[in-house]
Amino acid sequence: MSGLTNKRVILWDFDGVISDSNQVRKFGFEEIFKDFPAEEVSKLLIFHNKNGGLSRYVKIRYFYEVLLGTSITESEVLELAHAFSSIMKEELIKPEYLIRDAIDFIKDNYQKYEMHIVSGSDQNELRFLCKSLGIDTYFKTINGSPTHKNALVANLLKTYHYAKEDVILIGDSINDYEAASLNNITFSGYNNTALEEKGNYIRQFIC
């Protein structure tokens, strides 16, 4: 399978790779910003779609500081992020959002590879969702924001003393590709054909 030959560690993105959650995330931003001008919210959603691997904290600040041209306090960011997370926990706990192709591969191969989640989504929320969905035991660690994905990858490489040639990151966004490139590990795109030009690409997992 593309990119997985001779690898022993898989770093998984979550949204769009393990969970078909991107439309739910879109709805979450629309909901927390429903009282703001629709034009500015639409611009945020464009930014969100182009930067799937960035955290909601970054996107909330971007909405205020870049699109609205105003300041936002840290406590206000956290309050909005909490509201967003409540929506995600209510909806993404439903098993039908899991991407069966990826989940079947994970279940069949978690003893062959060391697997970690590295996501732009909130870490506490991710751990809640994975435990509620009964998939947390397949991963050695589950890691998310507010730590940036670039740092999450770097921390895992350092903590577990992984040789970089043994590690692959599977993701569906340009931010995933950048996190892999900055850390000098292999990247494979999945569920986003725009990433085919970046080299390795997985169309379907073969268990």
Image (cartoon, helix red, strand yellow):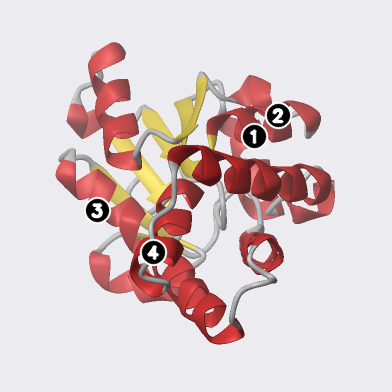
Residue 147, compared with residue 15, is above or below; it is above
The count of marks equals 4
Position of residue 96 in the picture relative to residue 154 (left or right): right
The residue labelled by disc 4 is 70
Q: Which is more foreground, mark 3 or mark 4? A: 4
Q: CA distance from mark 2 to mark 1?
A: 5 Å
Camera-nearest residue between 42 and 134: 42
User: Circle 2 sits in a helix, a strand or a loop, which is it?
Assistant: helix
Q: Quadrant of residue 167?
A: top left
The residue labelled by disc 1 is 125
Q: Is residue 137 in sight in this rendering? A: yes
Question: In the image as oriented, which residue stretches furthest toward the bottom?
Answer: 39
Residue 15: where, in percent of width, then height? 56, 52
Marks 2 and 1 in Cβ contact (< 8 Å): yes
The residue labelled by disc 3 is 178
Q: Is residue 108 in sight in this rendering? A: no
The residue located at (72%, 48%) in the rendering is: 88
Residue 155: where, in percent of width, then height? 28, 23
- Please, what is the three-letter code of the amino acid marked with disc 3? Glu
